[in-house]
Image: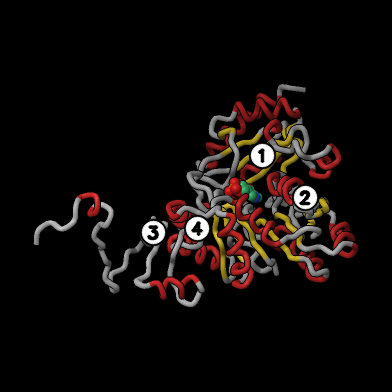
Amino acid sequence: MSKVMKPATLTNHPPTVEVPPDNHPLVAPVYQSVKFEFDSVDETLRNLRGERPGFFYQRSANPTTRQLELTLAALQNRADCLVCASGVGAINGTLLALTRADDHVLCFVETYGPTRQFIRRTLARFGVRHTMLSIEDLAGVERVLASTTTRLMIFESPTNPLNKIADIAALTALARRHGALTLLDNTFAGFHQHWQYPIDYYLHSLTKYASGHGDVMGGAVIADAEAIRRLRSDFTLLGGALDPHAAFLVQRGLKTYTLRYREQSASALKIAGFLSQHGAVARVHYAGLATHAQHALASRQMTEFGALLSVELRGGADAGRRFAEALQLFAIAASLGATESLVIPPQLMGTQDLSAAELVLSGIGPGTVRLAIGLEDVDDLLADIGQALQDCEKTP
Ligand SMILES: *Cc1c(COP(=O)(O)O)cnc(C)c1O
């Protein structure tokens, strides 16, 4: 046969390579394809009506992102999951999908900054009301839920950066009694923890422990199947789909998730212990320490306490800045849960949107420094922290 197709046609219709059904790759391929076709219009329509499995357009679904969704749902011990392009996308898309004008939302001063700002600024523009309490104020939660019909309560545990522990059993019981949905941003505790509580929606940044290598962003909502089905159409319209290559990288990162979480938590505990003995440090916030005010509660709820800790330096904001700059192995950078250690000095704590009273409620002080522990050798990290603290001790 002579050559039938011209080069421009050939390069746009490359040959298909079929892998035999009894021949399996150990790592699933990346389906880097926006479009999928069926052989007929009728089958396409059946797929779009949800009457047959398959894929049509990546903004709705893709096999690589779907594999990640099923993995994450199983890890959190729930039926289904929806992934999107960032943690903020997952959280704020869920908040948008679940609320309408005049609904009331209960949130906390200790909530992740962008979540707090989304509720206070963006949702407020659409007439969604909110009350913001401290996560330590259980009596306040009861009072607000009893007096104001509340659509949902969104919270975190441990909180950022002070590792306050939310009493999840008490909060979920109160929410159920008063008909409010519960949303737990479980990014800090990870996918293997807190599954035993009746949380309606788990929210995660995949940018942190899931991918674990600081090279990809993503977010996830995990819930029962019906809850995820209801969210999916809004998420498709919001458009922040996770790219299949990013999904592949997160899936690869997850292979070492449990090892990394365990190792980084063990290092964080050692470092927290060291810091709590140091003269330059007024206070250490790490729920794994027996001296943490909520250590007993944390131990009931969690088996590992995570890679994030914070300290109050006696020397205040200046000492915090000098400490961060003197650290050699800790980058002054956002995020956590990746392989490299990071530090956030007081100047970069991101509390500008809080009033003076709210800042007091949050517990963040002028000398609060946040450390995210990576996978470096813990002895090297301890030596680095020791040398950097010498500087702070010299100041009054
Ligand atoms: C990082 C983070 C987010 C946001 O995730 P991104 O992937 O950065 O959008 C939300 N919640 C918590 C607790 C986080 O640490």
Which residue shows up at 44% across the image and 64% down it? Answer: 56
Q: Nearer the viewer, mark 2 or mark 3?
A: 2
Label 3 neighbour load within 10 Å: few <14, some 14-19, many 20+ = some
Residue 361 horizontal/vertical position (percent):
83, 44
The kind of residue on which mark 1 rests is Arg
Marked residue nearer the N-terminal end (1 or 2): 2
- The span from disc 2 to disc 3 (Cα, nearest Å) is 39 Å
Q: CA distance from mark 1 to mark 2?
A: 30 Å
Viewport quadrant of the C terminus: top right
Graded by Cα atoms within 10 Å as few (under 14), some (14 to 19) or many (20 or more), the crowding at tag 4 reads some
The answer to whether residue 291 shows anywhere in this view is no
Residue 124 is tagged as 2
Q: Amino acid at mark 2?
A: Ala
**Mark 4: which secondary structure?**
loop
**How many angstroms separate mark 2 from mark 4 (CA)?**
28 Å
Res 370 label: 1
Q: What amino acid type should be assigned to the residue bearing mark 4?
A: Arg
Residue 182 screen position, x and y as percent: 73, 63
> How far, Cα to Cα, is label 4 from label 3?
13 Å
Q: Which residue is the site of mark 3?
A: 31
Rendered view: 94 above or below 268:
below
Q: Which residue is mark 4?
A: 59
**First in residue order: circle 2 vs circle 4:** 4
Is residue 73 or residue 163 the one in the foreground?
A: 73
